[in-house]
Image (tube, rainbow, N blue to C red):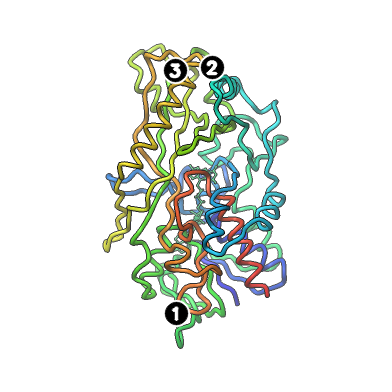
Amino acid sequence: MYVIIGTGAGGAIIARELAKNNLPVTILEKGPYIKSKDAFNYYDKYNETVDLLTTTCIGGATIVSMSNMVRALDEELLDYGVDLSEAYRYVEELVGVHQLDDSHIGKGTQAFLDAGEELGLNTMKMPKAIREEDCIQCGKCAFGCPADAKWSGKDFVDEAVEAGATLITEAEATEIMTENDAACGVKYIKDNQEQIIKADKVILSAGAIGSTFILRNTGISEAGRELFFDPFVSVGGYLKDVNFNTEVQMAGLVIGENFVLSPHFSSFIRANIPDDNVTDNDILSIMVKTPDEAKGYIDDDGEVVKINTIQDIRYLAEGTATAGFILEKAGVDPNTIGSTVYRGAHPGGTAAIGKIVDSNLETEIENLYVCDASVLPISPGKPPILTILALAKMLADHLKN
Ligand SMILES: Cc1cc2nc3c(=O)[nH]c(=O)nc-3n(C[C@H](O)[C@H](O)[C@H](O)COP(=O)(O)OP(=O)(O)OC[C@H]3O[C@@H](n4cnc5c(N)ncnc54)[C@H](O)[C@@H]3O)c2cc1C
């Protein structure tokens, strides 16, 4: 029996791949099974010092993602003995990665793309896994998708269940059981009662925070002593009647050396502008995302602590300044440009390859694997789902043999 914990970017595809190969799979998911359109209700709460976005529900954070799909860390992972080239090709085809048709590129996104080009920046349409025929261009990607037009981990869980996997939702895994230094089962809480499921192999995919708690309870106390989260801010201002808030979000991309930029609506920008006539329809804003050093950690009380280095701040400043140039070129009133607070949405690095897992993603406990953002050895500073999917495909192939 293969027991998979978590149904986000790491867990869902492993469940699919194993179940479709007629292997016995049970999936434990802490959150409920929900409709995509309701996902915004399942964002987690964090402490006041760290603004970190994650969700607990079927599909994990993939269900609120923008379905941005870019390769990241492919070169760097080679140094850790991990070659993802074949796995990337497989998952790109599986989820249908492509740049959106022009019919789904709105006025604000086009202004971003044109301004990026004019400034000589490395500018392109974002590769995505969105089905244009279903997408109603409502701008609500991060709420969950009202039209179910985006790929999410939920799609793969459904396929796994159809192929015979057992899904147990609202089941919080707490600890991996071991015998002779090998995994043999999982303890979990369901309906306020502790339960046990036996396993030959356990795949821990509870996300960078969730997996840390389980690893520590299992005796791997070094988990979570390092953490990155790909910091981001959104920078924007007033552009009358641009109506960017109803466009497909993050459909453009500028790749800088130390940052990526993508058009992303934030109502916090409108709140910054002291003019009652300015509405959400008049805002063009850009997300600035950077790689950060893994100087954060999860403390012994389970709180996420994030420390910003000079390099982290420098990268963010470079990206923010570049976003300002693009906004001005796109026609935004420069006197209105402001920023949101600093947040993170890609926690990772808590069980890094080379430290907590080997290049097959196995821990020091035989038959206990970790496969989620925890294992990324450095911050990608880019959307990580495709990389996690490719790592998971690689692990599924290893487990099948
Ligand atoms: C708003 C938003 C937009 C994003 N957009 C993009 C994007 O467009 N492209 C991109 O590449 N990345 C995006 N990301 C980031 C991406 O979604 C995450 O980096 C990725 O989903 C992490 O995968 P994971 O497997 O580590 O964790 P998750 O996807 O978070 O999955 C973890 C799963 O484990 C479950 N779980 C947790 N604890 C337990 C437990 N104890 N027992 C059982 N189950 C448990 C959770 O409920 C969840 O289902 C976005 C993130 C956010 C918040």
Residue 196 rendering spot, x and y as whole percentages: 47, 78
Residue 129 rendering spot, x and y as whole percentages: 65, 43
Q: Amino acid at mark 2?
A: Val
Is tag 3's residue or tag 1's residue first in the polypeptide sequence?
A: 1
**Label 1 secondary element:** strand
- Asked if 342 appears above or below 42 in the picture, the reply is above
Which quarter shows the N terminus? bottom right
CA distance separating discs 1 and 2: 56 Å
Residue 193, picture quadrant: bottom left
Q: Is residue 154 left or right of residue 163?
A: left
Residue 23, picture quadrant: bottom right
Q: Nearer the viewer, residue 28 or 2?
A: 2
Is tag 1's residue or tag 2's residue first in the polypeptide sequence?
A: 1
Residue, disc 1: 177
Residue, disc 3: 279
Question: What residue is at 59 percent from the left and 32 percent from the top?
Answer: 251
Residue, disc 2: 242
- Asked if 238 appears above or below 173 in the picture, the reply is above
Residue 12, picture quadrant: bottom right
**Label 3 secondary element:** loop
Q: Residues within 10 Å of mark 2 (few under 14, many from 20)?
A: many
Q: Is label 3 or label 1 in front? A: 1
